[in-house]
Image (tube, helix red, strand yellow):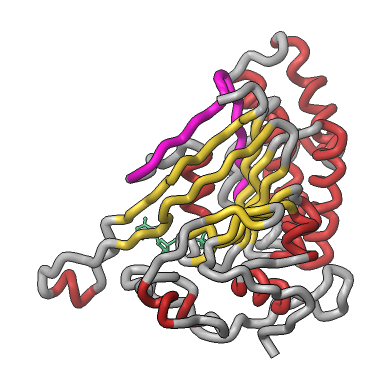
Amino acid sequence: MSGHEVLTLSSVSKAYGGRASLIEKLFGRQPKSLQAVREVSFTIRKGEVMGLVGESGCGKSTIARIAAGLMAPTGGEIGRAEKTRQQMIFQDPFSSLNPRWRVHDIVAEPIRTHRLRPKNAVSARVGELLTQVGLSEADGAKFPQAFSGGQRQRISIARALAGEPDFLILDEPTSALDVSVQAQILDLLRDLQARLHLTSLFITHNLPVVRLMADRIGVVYLGELVELAPTDAIFRRPRHPYTRLLIDAAPDLDAKDRSLHPIPGELPDPSDPPSGCVFRTRCPFATEKCAAERPLLRQIGAGEVRCHYDLDLTGRELAA
Ligand SMILES: Nc1ncnc2c1ncn2[C@@H]1O[C@H](COP(=O)(O)OP(=O)(O)OP(=O)(O)O)[C@@H](O)[C@H]1O
């Protein structure tokens, strides 16, 4: 790995043994195994925000956990820059903070664990971090239950920053919040990003959110990376039909009704994916070749696309 790469996933896969259904348990049948992530490759460089976007169940959280080192892949390799300090911010700010700890101790913990400050400087650092995320020093004396969802996510952010991470993984950090609170937390994250030059992996099902946050976007469908390109290229010229459909499904962040429109068609059963191209059952352009051959991820323009064809999808509404 060169000095600029913080994390590299090379053809990373993850198969789960499969959860047994009630019927399977009753009849002693083996549950079906499930390929949650299939041959995903990408690199995150220092100072960069890489976004991953896709519908629920496409494997985003699995990729996040593998990237964080919380779970081992069943295939492929992971390269990490030496001595990388990582922190993770989770979706649910209610379950991710210990209710028995005061906020001060929650935020102080990574500082103490990694011995980042002398003992007598920890409190001042906690105060500084709480202020940085829009809370007050006095909030440190309270327990997490005293705070709203948005404020709790601020505490999670302060705790993550307390560890002085070289790499931050954010898994749906605003999805559990009300829309107006979501915007405030995204503003805060953008501000911290600009000031601290954080390197991060930002995961969400919401394309407008990832557009706001990321320098590069990876689009995931049924465990596969189907497109990976700089954010402006994704929006200026999406190359994969699924990316185009995600763009069509997403209202602008400043639109009145900000709910995502459903994408036509159903997500196939991940334990029984379609042959050839995994997206073909929902693709308006699918041909026989798509059913027969799995497309490779290939370089087109500024990014990489997993499609047999070089489609011009600029300005085309597919979802209508
Ligand atoms: N521990 C597990 N055992 C078996 N299957 C699992 C397990 N965890 C996840 N899965 C399955 O793997 C697939 C990918 O799940 P994952 O949580 O990574 O997706 P996701 O895109 O993050 O979805 P969501 O946004 O709903 O969390 C899904 O089909 C899910 O049901």
Nearest the viewer among 29 and 110 is 29
**Residue 92 visible in this rendered orientation of the protein:** no
Nearest the viewer among 49 and 285 is 285
Looking at the rendering, in which quadrant would you find the C terminus?
bottom right
Q: Is 249 left or right of 1, judged from the image as shown?
A: right
Nearest the viewer among 35 and 183 is 35
Whole-percent x and y of residue 102?
Answer: 67, 35
Q: Is 60 left or right of 261, judged from the image as shown?
A: left
Q: On screen, 174 above or below 249?
A: above
Whole-percent x and y of residue 2?
Answer: 60, 24
Quadrant assignment, res 191: top right
Quadrant assignment, res 117: top right
Residue drawn at point x = 70 percent, y = 78 percent: 249
Start-end of magenta stretch? 75-93
Nearest the viewer among 36 and 3 is 3
Quadrant assignment, res 172: bottom right
- Does the magenta-highlighted stretch encompass residue 86? yes
Q: On screen, 218 above or below 199?
A: below
Residue drawn at point x = 70 percent, y = 67 percent: 238
- Does the magenta-highlighted stretch encompass residue 193? no
Whole-percent x and y of residue 241?
Answer: 61, 74
Looking at the rendering, in which quadrant would you find the N terminus?
top right
Residue drawn at point x = 74 percent, y = 81 percent: 316
